[in-house]
Amino acid sequence: MEEFALIMRHEDGQKVASPEQIQIWMKQTMDWIGGIAAQNKFVEGSGLLFDDCRVVHHNNVVTNGPFGEIKETIGGYLIVKAESIDEAVEFAKGSPVLQGDGNTMEVRKIASKDGLH
């Protein structure tokens, strides 16, 4: 079994939802993760905050961000165990993130600890 990262991409990650919308989304997300965990295929995951972040550029230039001009932001990630990328994609298809217009889930195989695929 291999590990895959499910990366949550939000079209407008800095748009503020109402507390009620956030509560509904969090319940849906916890139910989704719970379904993966019930199959013993959830490894870890977390949301990513926007209140204190930096971007390191070429030549070690550091800026506050990501803000403003970017089209989409990464809102969080999960790491799951799956037999194939197709199984990991099926997990991603169940994400509540996909309810948002323009939101996507990126699925990537994680390199093994020895660096081999």
Image (tube, helix red, strand yellow):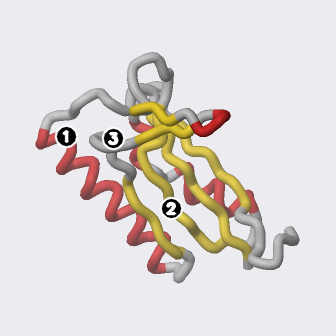
Cα distance between the residues tagged 3 and 1? 18 Å
Q: Which mark is residue 21?
A: 1
Whichever of labels 3 and 1 marks the residue nearer the N terminus, that label is 1
88 displayed left or right of 44:
right
Say which residue appears at 48% left-offset and 41% top-offset.
74
**Which type of secondary structure does the marked residue at label 3 adopt?**
loop
Label 2 neighbourhood size at 10 Å, few (<14), some (14-19), many (20+)?
Answer: some
Circle 2/circle 1 CB separation < 8 Å: no
The residue lying toward the viewer, choosing from 77 and 104, is: 77
Label 1 neighbourhood size at 10 Å, few (<14), some (14-19), many (20+)?
Answer: few
- Which is in the foreground here, disc 3 or disc 2? 3
Instruction: Please name the residue that numbered disc 3 is placed on.
Output: 50
Residue projecting furthest to the right:
116
Q: Identity of the amino acid at label 3?
A: Phe
Task: State the image coordinates of residue 97 (x, y, percent, origin top left).
Answer: 42, 43
Cα distance between the residues tagged 2 and 1? 21 Å
The residue lying toward the viewer, choosing from 104 and 60, is: 60
Whichever of labels 3 and 2 marks the residue nearer the N terminus, that label is 3
Label 3 neighbourhood size at 10 Å, few (<14), some (14-19), many (20+)?
Answer: some
Whichever of labels 2 and 1 marks the residue nearer the N terminus, that label is 1
The residue lying toward the viewer, choosing from 61 and 64, is: 61
